[in-house]
Amino acid sequence: MRGTLFPRLSADLSLNNDPLSLYTRGTAHIVATSLWPTHSPNEVKHRVDTPSAQRTEPPSPTTRPPSNCRGIMSGTLESLKATAERIILDPKYHDLLAVVKAARNGAVYGTKVRFPHALVMILLFRSGTIREKAGLIFRATRTHARNLAKFATIYKLTCMLLKNFGPTPGKEGPYDSFIAGLLGGYVVFGQRSRSGKISSVNQQIVIYVFARVVLALAHMAVKPGYGLPGVSEPARSAAISYYAWPVFASVSWAAVMHLFKYHAVELQPSLRSSMTYIYANADQWDGLRNFMWHNK
């Protein structure tokens, strides 16, 4: 743009060096300098004297080829990655980093387990708007993931402290896991909300754990060489293991149906809701619509 402002004048002046030409060239230089004050006099003189066809723009000192920027960023990221790898693979940080990974795993597992369950149960069996149902799904998933992450953190941290500061520093004690689980269970799952209620999500988690504990203790009770006297002998243990499951299943269903019939309010809310849908609502219909296609 600047080179085309005085094209004819620049071409003519480049061929003459008489006083008039020099005077005219100086005047043009002053005008150009006042129009573009950000450039040095030498640069403006070069632009006035040089035809536009021969002029090239100088490279900006602040610009770099994009490939160089990507290369620098890639090298920085690789350096940070190598530093992080060196830290997490250092044995002296293993126990502390195990606490961090346990928290991560608890949060991820809680999300994976709770989200699909809450999505199906709330969409199918809860009333309300889509916004309200989405809020319930989010809160249930957040509670499950957060509580598992908190429990994992407390458990691993307590085990680490007992290992390093217990009666035999550097070695795990036989009851370290029991003590850590006791503390974590009380802090995370044993508390009530501000309104005095127990979280339904926590109830489901604890009941799930309790059922597995009872089943494991039943297996241990009849395990030969390890279980209770009398029932852990090989012959009796085999017979009990064969017949125990049918008896257990029958008694469990008999008990829950009796409780649902006469003491339904004492059952866990989600179980009570499911049983109401299947059994209680089966007695009610007023046409083909809510007999086959709809429940109510």
Image: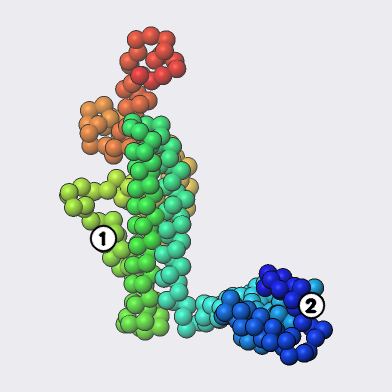
Mark identifier at residue 101: none
Dot 1: what SS? helix
Residue placed at 33% from the left, 32% from the top? 128
Whole-percent x and y of residue 256? 31, 33
| Residue sitting at the far top | 287
Nearer to us of marks 1 and 2 is 2
Q: Assess disc 2: are there few (<14), some (14-19) or many (≥20) residues with their C-alpha within 10 Å of its C-alpha.
A: some
Q: Nearer the viewer, residue 295 or 244?
A: 295
Q: Quadrant of the N terminus?
A: bottom right
Q: Assess disc 1: are there few (<14), some (14-19) or many (≥20) residues with their C-alpha within 10 Å of its C-alpha.
A: few
Residue placed at 38% from the left, 9% from the top? 287
Q: Where is residue 136, by image quadrant?
A: top left
Name the side, left or right, on which 233 lies relative to 40: left
Whole-percent x and y of residue 173? 36, 75
Q: Where is residue 257, by image quadrant?
A: top left
Residue behind mark 2: 11
Q: Which of marks 1 and 2 is nearer the N terminus?
A: 2
Above-or-below relation of 173 to 131: below
Mark count: 2
Above-or-below relation of 22 to 99: below
The reply to whether discs 1 and 2 touch (Cβ–Cβ < 8 Å) is no
Q: Nearer the viewer, residue 212 or 109?
A: 109
| Amino acid beneath label 1 | Tyr
Residue behind mark 1: 186
Dot 2: what SS? helix
